Image: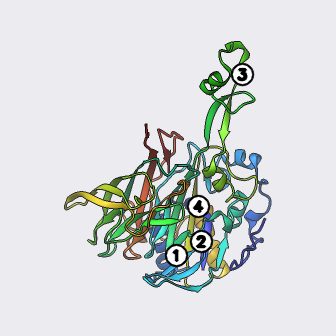
Amino acid sequence: MLYCFPGYPKTLLNAGGLQHCVEEVEQLGILEHDSAVQYRKEGVFVRGEHEELLYPVEYHMSALCLRDGITWNWFDENWAFGNGGTVHKTSASPDYKTVVHGTDLNLDQFLTRYGSTRLAELELERLHIRHEGWEKYEARWTPGTCPQESHIVHLTWLITTHQLPPFAYERIRDLIEYGATPKDLHRYSQEAGKHFSAIRKWDGSSAVGVRA
Amino acid sequence: MADASPGGVGFDTTLPASTGVAAVGVAAAAARRDHVHPSAVTYAGGNTTEATTTSTTAVDLITVSALTIAAATPIHIVTVGRKTSGAAAGAGLGIKLNTTVVSEADTVAALLILTGNDQAETGGVCAVIPPRVTSYLRTGCAFYNLYTTASIDSGTQPACGDNNDAPTASITDFVIRGISGNALVTLGSDELNVYTLATS
């Protein structure tokens, strides 16, 4: 069963750390690790040359995902969830251009079409270019919830062999969404990055392309 | 607001977080910036920590969405990957363009291969994907560097087309796929930058 939570785990446990927590330290559940099993948007498949659909995906989206506008429809066609645990990251940035007010022409295009114009008569504005990629991305969100500026979406999902009992789900939710302190911290590896990831802050800059 | 898609199991509306929170929309987005409430969305100044997985089948690890890159426009990408110790198993990164897996994440041949030694490793890769026009749909190449405590390795890998033809439609989603050869090995990737190259 697939459980999806919003954000990076607030405990800073990475996918390996979260798995270690759930399976070994706090023994909350068992994750699916069969290397033949791949969860996808369209169902659970046997991986290989002759891929076969095993059964439909059973999933549970956290209530906070829904609050952010992320439902099952947010995941695109042929989206792969794999198995085990994953902390996923998506970035998106709207594109803007400066246009002459009331048109979609930039200054150069405006002058080409209308000839010399007194600068004092022109009013410029910043226009969000709603190109194909943006329209497609925005449509994945619940209407009205897609952020209209550069942003990053972190999602954490776990794939378990069986449905979790309520106490286990709530404990995992608290670890991921609310930063509850993991038990028995001495049982986590001291190897840098093995169970905990170093936090990085995003300065919002985008050089030439788009950054994730 | 609940999603009633077939196959779903519904949502637990008894969760405390499902009540008493700000409504969605602009006001909620503004409220989220102070990071008082847990949220999936991060703005400038927020957490942008790496993507990681223990999946032993390919998974969508990092995505750059909301792009519109015409088929005739070359693409240049840069990203980094790492794996932890835990088992004698490799890990790898691959590429999906829109919904098409052009270079599947694999532990043998993929965009970036981390070796099967039981050790922590770090690698970096840059790739060029030429225009994706009819009859030229499997043309990408990648250059990588791989660092371990024992050695440094570098070389080339296919970056586009070892599994499927690249789509000829505009690229709207650029996805890095990941796979770990063993669930005890964590694969990480970060700092994916996607650039388009001028054509004239």
Tell me, yes or no, whether the two marked residues, 4 and 2, touch with CB atoms within 8 Å. Answer: no
Say which label, 4 or 3, has the lower sequence index: 3
Q: Is residue B68 visible?
A: yes
Q: Amino acid at mark 1?
A: Val
Foreground of the two, A12 or B42: B42
Tell me, yes or no, whether the two marked residues, 1 and 2, touch with CB atoms within 8 Å. Answer: yes
- As drawn, A150 above or below B121: above
SS for dot 2? helix
Q: Which mark is residue A22?
A: 1
Question: What colour scheme governs how the chains and residues are painted in the rendered image of this protein?
Answer: rainbow
Image quadrant holding the C terminus of chain B, namely top left
Q: Which residue is found at the position 67% from the left and 68% from the top? A: A72
- How much space separates mark 4 and mark 1, taking CA atoms? 15 Å
Say which label, 1 or 2, has the lower sequence index: 1
Image x and y of residue B48, in percent: 51, 51
Task: Kindly identify which residue carries mark 4.
Answer: A179
Q: Amino acid at mark 2?
A: Ile
SS for dot 3? loop
Are labels 4 and 1 on one chain? yes
Res A70 → quadrant: bottom right
Say which label, 3 or 1, has the lower sequence index: 1
Q: Amino acid at mark 3?
A: Glu
Which of labels 3 and 2 is toward the front? 3
Q: Which residue is found at the position 68% from the left and 66% from the top? A: A73
Are labels 1 and 2 on one chain? yes
Foreground of the two, B185 or A121: A121
